[in-house]
Image: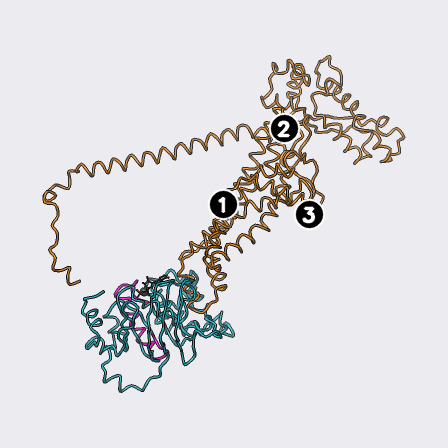
Amino acid sequence: MTDVTNTPVPSGPEKSRGSSLYALDKRTKRRNAAEARFKAYGIAAVCVGLAFLVILLVSIVRNGIPAFTQTFVELPIYLNEEKLDPDGNRDPAAMSKVSTFGYNPLIEDALVQLMADNGIETDMDGPTLRKMLSSSVPAQVRDYTLANPDQVGETVTFRVLASSRVDGYMKGRVQREDLERDKNLDAAHLDIVDQLVDAGAVERTFNWAFITGADASESRPEQAGIGVSMIGSFFMMIVVLVLALPIGVAASIYLEEFAAKNRFTDLIEVNISNLAAVPSIVFGILGLAVFIQFGGLPQSAPLVGGLVLTLMTLPTIIISTRASLKAVPPSIRDAALGVGASKTQAVFHHVLPLAMPGILTGTIIGLAQALGETAPLLLIGMVGYIATNYPEGIVDGFLAPNSAMPAQIYEWAKRADPAYYERAWGGIIVLLLFLMTMNIIAIILRRRFERRW
Amino acid sequence: MNQMPMTSENVTTMPTKNTKITARDVQVYYGDTHAIKDVDVDIEDRTVTAFIGPSGCGKSTFLRCLNRMNDTIDICRVEGAIKIDNEDIYDKKVDPVQLRAKVGMVFQKPNPFPKSIYDNIAYGPRIHGLAKSKADLDEIVEKSLRRGAIWDEVKDRLHAPGTGLSGGQQQRLCIARAVATEPEVLLMDEPCSALDPIATDQVEDLIDELRSQYSVVIVTHSMQQAARVSQKTAFFHLGNLVEYGETDQIFTNPKDPRTESYISGRIG
Ligand SMILES: Nc1ncnc2c1ncn2[C@@H]1O[C@H](COP(=O)(O)OP(=O)(O)O)[C@@H](O)[C@H]1O
Ligand SMILES: [Mg+2]
């Protein structure tokens, strides 16, 4: 202190004296230019990112939206008693002897009648006309008849699915020239469709069945829905949430707040970070070996999928939880310990609530990743499984074979029919809506728990 | 300040004081660093004791030995004997949690919990089970806030966040929080270094009042502050307790040349 006062104050460079503040010197100009350049780079980068995002969203919406609508035909069908219940006593066992094929003639007759009623002139016979309808129609009519035996002998108006070609024509995906070499449909059918649309018997409406329905066979894209695989994803997410959140948070709290910092914990830390970078397919084969081959759990079960995704999500949750615990100022811990709180009390009363927004965000991001993950499901048999049935209960939900949303999307994209390609895009919209919802929940929770200090 | 530093005559006229804390042959190591060397000191009850010394000399380290806050640092090792009321606080039977209720601490940076003013004060009594009813707790909160000389400023907004107060108010809130657990010793580590002069003044006044009930140990880098608030001063240098005595004597007539150089501004 005393020494400093004795040394002379070094005087600044002489030339800077007397220079005007209005005139920018060279150095300042160069610095300003560099700053402007950097800003321009930044704006350009943001714009490029936004452009990609817009392209992505536009193409997803354009390709996917049609999947949410479907073409239906209003078809009055005469439920012919002679064919459906020759004995006339409405015995369910006897009625169910009539297979779906037995219903085809009724439908064909109904179509011929529909042409006549609407004054459409055509030389097509019933079976040819039936090509306009989905091959799921006989089953639909049969199910209805078996459920309502009293309607036999009446004419019932059904709302039935049009075939995927007709649907494609209504959506502009299929043109007349496309049908030249198509054995499923002729251009002449489309003329009929045009007339039926004018008559109000054919219309394209919103299709809940796409969201709630099950997957269908390769030849019936018009019937396929993402609902059952959504249930599969739902049960997997339950497993992930119930296992990964408590295990991950407990592990992070222990490592961050209690464990001694030594070689061993360093090793654990490095390994957790490494796990986060392990390709997800590795977790898939691990799940196959451990849970299915060794543990004897059923193949394609959401429980196994959930376990595999738990392994995959744990590192994400641990890393984000530890980061948010680290971000809590040490002064809060001191304050709690200083008034005589035990370490556990300090952590649970003060540190954890402050870290909660970060933990929740990390968890939800982990869940979102898991929700979109396909590769590990490949190895445990959830990809390619045709999910046609809803699970019968909670236990079944975990254990019965099922698919998952991304697996279902992949499956659809793989199929040859362009109608399935459209459904794959539609499935992506559903998946993205789920992810967006999760992110919004994350933001809301973060807002709610956020405290300032 | 309503109370100027004590003169030696003043001290002798006061009733004889009990020794609250005795430290003998205390060594503290951070890994291989020997941070506190051979410290012997007797700290009196109902007295403000100031620890002064150049930064890095071990004042905080020694202060944190007194409520075992150093336990939270993995590499820290404490040797020697520290007794409060003749009980060895490093004894195996002693739970640091109980010790810290008896030896309150106020930190350099005001660190209220991000909770309401009321909850800040009530937290300690709650975890130690000091209040049997809500009314009890209300009373403890009011009493503590009064002792912290901040009651009048916050009584209308007890449920507003403690972090919304000004720096000086926050520090007095922290002092109130520390006294809420009925401690006998109050440790303060540079409690005014983050405060402006007016807030510093208020906190110093408060420290002077607290002397009537507690043994207060305050670390400060300001010699003026030590002179203003303390009756006893300990000068630390490079981990050694160089000189310990009446504040007056340390500042007017230091025995050790190192103390003299520090006080006259040659080291530090
Ligand atoms: N947590 C710690 N880990 C390692 N060394 C520390 C730690 N805290 C303090 N020290 C060292 O102990 C010595 C005394 O520090 P401290 O007690 O904080 O000094 P003061 O409070 O007097 O400025 C310093 O050399 C410092 O580097
Ligand atoms: Mg210090």
Q: Chain of mark 1?
A: A
Please name which of the two marks, 3 or 2, marks the residue nearer to the observer.
Answer: 3
Q: Is residue B211 magenta?
A: yes
Q: Which chain is orange in the rendering?
A: A
Residue A245 at least partly seen: yes
Residue B11 falls left or right of residue A91: left
On the image, which quarter does residue B91 sit in? Answer: bottom left
Q: Which chain is cyan in the rendering?
A: B
Q: Chain of mark 3?
A: A
Q: Is residue B106 above or below residue B12?
A: above
Residue B187 falls left or right of residue B249: right
Label 1, label 3: how far apart the Cα atoms are: 35 Å
Q: Could you say which is closer to the camera, residue A294 or residue B67?
A: A294
- Write down the residue under mark 1: A274
**Residue A123's spot in the image, x, y percent?**
73, 12
- Mark toward the start of the polypeptide (1 vs 3): 1
Specify the quadrant that holds the C terminus of chain A: bottom left
Q: Residue at x 19, y 76 (%)?
A: B252
**Residue A109's spot in the image, x, y percent?**
78, 21
Badge 1, how many Cα within 10 Å: few under 14, some, many 20+? few
Residue A70: image tag? 2
- Mark toward the start of the polypeptide (3 vs 2): 2
- Write down the residue under mark 3: A394
Q: Which residues are magenta?
A: B189-216
Badge 3, how many Cα within 10 Å: few under 14, some, many 20+? few
Please name which of the two marks, 1 or 3, marks the residue nearer to the observer.
Answer: 1
**Residue A251's spot in the image, x, y percent?**
53, 55
Callout 1 secondary element: helix
Callout 3 secondary element: helix
Label 3, label 2: how far apart the Cα atoms are: 31 Å
